[in-house]
């Protein structure tokens, strides 16, 4: 019974809980838009609104949350690890910075790249399951699913049975290529924008809620814009299974065939939906994370959150 307060007393305990709450807030707030993005990438025709109306009319609003169990179940651990790894790496890459000063922008960028590469090991299987479930639709596009999954566990069993454990890591390489640079951009943008919106807050930790929402939202948008073509390729590769014809043999083949068959615009299809979701989700993630962290650290007097922007 003494585990919980002792757990929270440590830095890792606070980061774990705050990071988990931030991740959950991000998943719940942005999952419908993420489902819409995946559908757009895998469909040859139809605007976001057209696909949205079609799905809601035929399957109901709940269809937009299909497959949310896998990412929601993993976000506590994943998001906590991301923030903790980033905190450690951002200082490790620039040890010249004093412990009571915020990490340098060099440390932030390199720490973000390292964090993105490491977290891909956790994220690749989760996104694979999520994509297989999100693409199990009857009406959004032309491709008809060959399997009928009842949920995340059903997908995992099917993959392990037909492709083995290695099948869960289909798309790992492209996930690393996407997430490493995008996380560098992500954390760099957040740290830079929060300082611009509220000068001095990186050192004092007293940024306003509005600053968190805007800086977090812009960080999400910037990270998606820089990596979006790679995400399109990743989605198409992970949508393939051994039980269906293998259209693409690898990353380069998928890139070349997609552009040849559908034009260069295919690499940016669904970007509007993605950045809209990114702004909402990452604003929610950073706000929830900062609120939770300050609440947990309140007894130690670490930072406050202002309800109005004083910067």
Image (cartoon, helix red, strand yellow):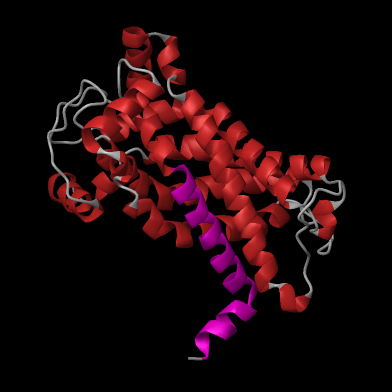
Residue 145 % position (x, y): 16, 32
Residue that sits furthest to the bottom in the current view: 1
Relative horizontal placement of residue 99, taking residue 244 as reference (left or right): right
Can residue 58 be seen here? The reply is: yes
Task: Count the marks.
Answer: 0
Q: In this view, does 300 lie to the left or right of 83?
A: right
In this picture, residue 174 sits left or right of residue 67: right
Q: Residue at x 76, y 45 (%)?
A: 194
Residue 162: image location, x then y, percent: 13, 45
| 298 and 50: which is toward the camera | 50
Q: Residue at x 58, y 64 (%)?
A: 18
**Residue range (magenta):** 2-30
Residue 60, percent from left and from top: 27, 39
Whether residue 97 is visible to the viewer of this picture, yes or no, is no
In the depicted structure, whether residue 9 falls above or below residue 277 = below
Q: Quadrant of residue 258?
A: top left
Where on the picture, by quarter, is residue 281?
top right
Q: Is the magenta stretch mostly helix, strand or loop?
A: helix
Name the foreground residue: 21 vs 182.
21
Q: Residue 192: x and y, percent? A: 76, 41
The front one of 16 and 69 is 69
Is residue 12 one of those drawn in magenta? yes
Residue visible at 56% across and 80% down?
7
Q: Does the magenta stretch include residue 202?
A: no
Vertical relation: 130 (above or below) 2: above
**219 over 292 or under it: above or below:** above
Q: In this view, does 157 lie to the left or right of 294?
A: left
Location of residue 236 (image quadrant): top left
């Amino acid at each position: 019974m003494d585990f919980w307060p002792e757990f929270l007393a440590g830095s890792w305990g606070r980061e774990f809980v705050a990071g988990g709450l931030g991740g959950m807030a991000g998943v719940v707030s942005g999952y419908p838009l993420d489902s819409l993005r995946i559908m757009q990438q895998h469909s040859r025709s139809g605007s976001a609104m057209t696909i949205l109306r079609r799905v809601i009319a035929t399957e109901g609003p709940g269809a937009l949350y299909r497959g949310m169990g896998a990412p929601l179940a993993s976000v506590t651990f994943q998001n906590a690890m991301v923030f903790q790894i980033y905190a450690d790496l951002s200082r490790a890459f620039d040890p010249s910075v004093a412990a009571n000063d915020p990490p340098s922008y060099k440390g932030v960028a390199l720490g973000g790249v390292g964090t993105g590469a490491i977290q891909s090991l956790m994220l690749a299987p989760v996104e694979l399951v999520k994509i297989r479930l999100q693409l199990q639709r009857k009406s959004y596009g032309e491709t008809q699913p060959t399997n009928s999954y009842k949920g995340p566990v059903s997908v995992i069993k099917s993959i392990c049975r037909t492709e083995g454990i290695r099948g869960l890591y289909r798309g790992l390489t492209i996930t690393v290529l996407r997430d490493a640079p995008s996380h560098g951009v992500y954390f760099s943008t957040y740290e830079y924008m929060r300082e611009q919106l509220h000068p001095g807050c990186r050192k004092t930790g007293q940024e306003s809620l509005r600053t968190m929402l805007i800086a977090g939202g812009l960080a999400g948008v910037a990270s998606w814009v820089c990596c979006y073509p790679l995400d399109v390729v990743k989605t198409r590769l992970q949508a393939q299974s051994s039980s269906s014809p293998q259209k693409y043999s690898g990353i380069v083949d998928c890139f070349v065939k997609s552009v040849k068959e559908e034009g260069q615009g295919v690499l940016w299809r669904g970007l509007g939906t993605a950045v809209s979701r990114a702004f909402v989700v990452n604003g929610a993630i950073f706000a929830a994370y900062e609120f939770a962290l300050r609440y947990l650290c309140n007894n130690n007097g670490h930072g406050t959150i202002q309800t109005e922007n004083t910067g």
